[in-house]
Amino acid sequence: MRAIIIGAGRGSRLMPTTADAPKCFAEVGGMRIIDWAIEAFRQNGVTDVAYIGGYQIEKLRAAYPEFDFRHNHAWEQNNILASLFFAEDLMDEPFICSYSDILYRPSVIEGLLASRDDMTLSIDTKWLNRYGERTEHPSDDAEKATVAGGLVTRVDRKIPEGEAYGEFTGVAKFTAEGARRLTQHYHEAREQYATGEFRDGRTFEKAYLIQLFQLMVEAGERFGHTDTPGGYIEIDTQQDFDFARRNWASGGV
């Protein structure tokens, strides 16, 4: 099993923290955000780590020479979906992909590894607990999911809060077959939406990862889910960063 961490963007909403360093270098509880992810993988026996970088990639290369790097040289023009596929050559075997600006416990990786589905999303079922004070990133901007019968039925920011089963944590697992189907749908969509709008007013190059997932769900693909009742924080804004520093290391989330 390989880990592919997607972290090409600058994280401008976390300025000035990201003024001179990658977002994943921000420290929470005496560790960089990325080091929490590495530890979660390590505790589950996943030590083959690839990193898709862009902004300040040279600092990541210097700090983590053991990573297998892929360079998203167009990070200012694209988004997380296009960024992931800079590592398409590494998708010929099972992998877990992860956003780089999130904190999660080792149990999140453990749950994904235990899943028998070809494609599995990690879902935080206690997601609303973090949104009481999250005024800079309200719940209507969360990557929410609905489920039925053990499968994801929708993953979309537009899901009403009251209908959401939970929030996609930004961590997903693919078997070799799941990876094959993911790449197939990616290339079909890229060709179909080469010009014009892809989804929600976005071009394909500016698309979010969940927008491809949702297209796949609509095409009949089966995404399983593993649940975590907390044990996860997205760090998008300075407000999120302050919340994480107050609560994460003590186990308060």
Image (cartoon, rainbow, N blue to C red):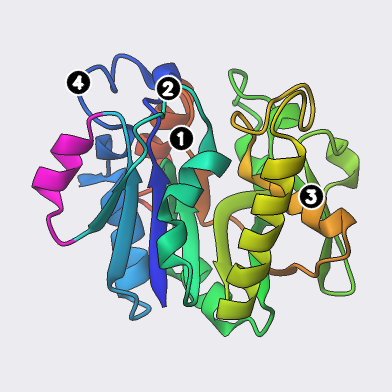
161 to 40, vertically: above or below? above
Residue at horizontal 60 percent and vertical 26 percent from the top: 134
Closer to the chain start, of discs 4 and 1, is 4
110 to 214, vertically: above or below? below
How packed mark 4 is, by other alpha carbons closer than 10 Å (few <14, some 14-19, many 20 or more), is few
Give the amino acid type for the residue marked by disc 4 in the picture. Answer: Asp
Q: Nearer the viewer, mark 4 or mark 2?
A: 2
Q: Nearer the viewer, mark 4 or mark 3?
A: 3
Closer to the chain start, of discs 4 and 3, is 4
- Tag on residue 214? 3
Q: Under tag 2, what secondary structure?
A: loop
Q: Under tag 1, what secondary structure?
A: loop
- Tag on residue 76? 2
Q: Nearer the viewer, mark 2 or mark 3?
A: 2
Q: Are marks 4 and 2 in contact (CB under 8 Å)?
A: no
State the separation of the CA atoms marked 4 and 1: 17 Å
State the separation of the CA atoms marked 4 and 2: 16 Å
251 to 53, vertically: above or below? below
Q: Is residue 81 left or right of residue 193?
A: left
Q: Is residue 108 left or right of residue 26?
A: right
Instruction: Please provide the residue range marked out in magenta.
Output: 56-66
Q: Is residue 57 magenta?
A: yes
| Residue 175 rendering spot, x and y as whole percentages | 57, 78
State the separation of the CA atoms marked 2 and 3: 24 Å
